[in-house]
């Protein structure tokens, strides 16, 4: 029953422009736009990318994004779910909760220096990603 309902809804969405009477049904969904004369200038767009301050807090946030993108592109288990998992791990590493947990736990104490190194590498990658994003944002905003 639910499958038939989904098929009916999909069919109605596909055929909806043909089902209604009026100018849209007669012309379809295509709209014709008049070409502007060559002497006029085009209006500027309202599209712009914001730049972020290169602070330690923003570098930590950018490192979480780097971990997510790495999870998306990871060749073996890559995908959205693995990206979310690595982003959560990166959040814990970047903001220090995993390193604090490792220092308090007796069995993980010997690995705390390695966890600190991974944490610092992630924050450094976030810093570079933030600098790259700001560079692209400035170039795109100046081109518009």
Image (cartoon, grey):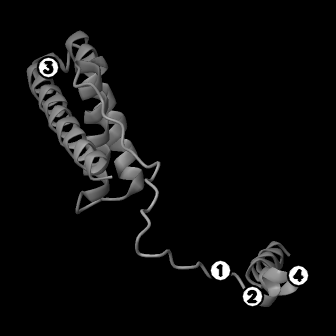
Task: State the CA–CA distance, disc 2 to disc 1.
Answer: 8 Å
* Upstream in sequence: badge 1 or badge 3: 1
Disc 1: which residue: 31
Task: State the CA–CA distance, disc 1 to disc 3.
Answer: 62 Å
- Say which mark, if any, is on residue 20: 4
Mark 2 Cα within 10 Å, few/some/many (few <14, many 20+)?
Answer: few
Toward the viewer: 101 or 27? Answer: 27
Toward the viewer: 49 or 107? Answer: 49
Task: State the CA–CA distance, disc 3 to disc 2.
Answer: 67 Å
Mark 1 Cα within 10 Å, few/some/many (few <14, many 20+)?
Answer: few
Q: Nearer the viewer, mark 4 or mark 3?
A: 4
Task: State the CA–CA distance, disc 2 to disc 4.
Answer: 12 Å
* Upstream in sequence: badge 3 or badge 2: 2
| Residue 15 x %, y % | 78, 85
| Residue 37 x %, y % | 47, 76
Which element type, helix, strand or loop, lies under badge 4? Answer: loop
Mark 3 Cα within 10 Å, few/some/many (few <14, many 20+)?
Answer: some
Q: Are discs 2 and 1 less than 8 Å apart at CB?
A: yes
Asked if 37 appears above or below 114 in the picture, the reply is: below
- Say which mark, if any, is on residue 27: 2
Q: Is residue 15 left or right of residue 51?
A: right
* The residue positioned farthest toward the top in the image shown: 104
Toward the viewer: 5 or 124? Answer: 124
Disc 3: which residue: 112
Residue in the picture at 22% in, 25% down: 54
Which image quarter holds the N terminus?
bottom right
């Amino acid at each position: 029953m639910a499958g038939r309902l989904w098929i009916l809804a999909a069919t109605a969405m596909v055929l909806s422009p043909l089902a209604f009477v009026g100018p849209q049904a007669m012309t379809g969904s295509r709209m014709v736009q008049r070409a502007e004369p060559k002497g006029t200038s085009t209006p500027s767009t309202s599209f712009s990318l914001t730049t972020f301050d290169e602070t330690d807090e923003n570098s930590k946030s950018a490192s979480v994004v780097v971990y997510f993108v790495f999870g998306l592109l990871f060749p073996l288990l890559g995908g959205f779910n693995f990206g979310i998992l690595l982003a959560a791990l990166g959040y814990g590493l970047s903001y220090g909760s995993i390193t604090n947990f490792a220092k308090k736990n007796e069995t993980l104490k010997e690995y705390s220096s390695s966890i600190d190194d991974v944490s610092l590498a992630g924050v450094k990658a976030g810093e570079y990603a933030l600098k790259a994003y700001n560079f692209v944002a400035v170039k795109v905003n100046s081109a518009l």
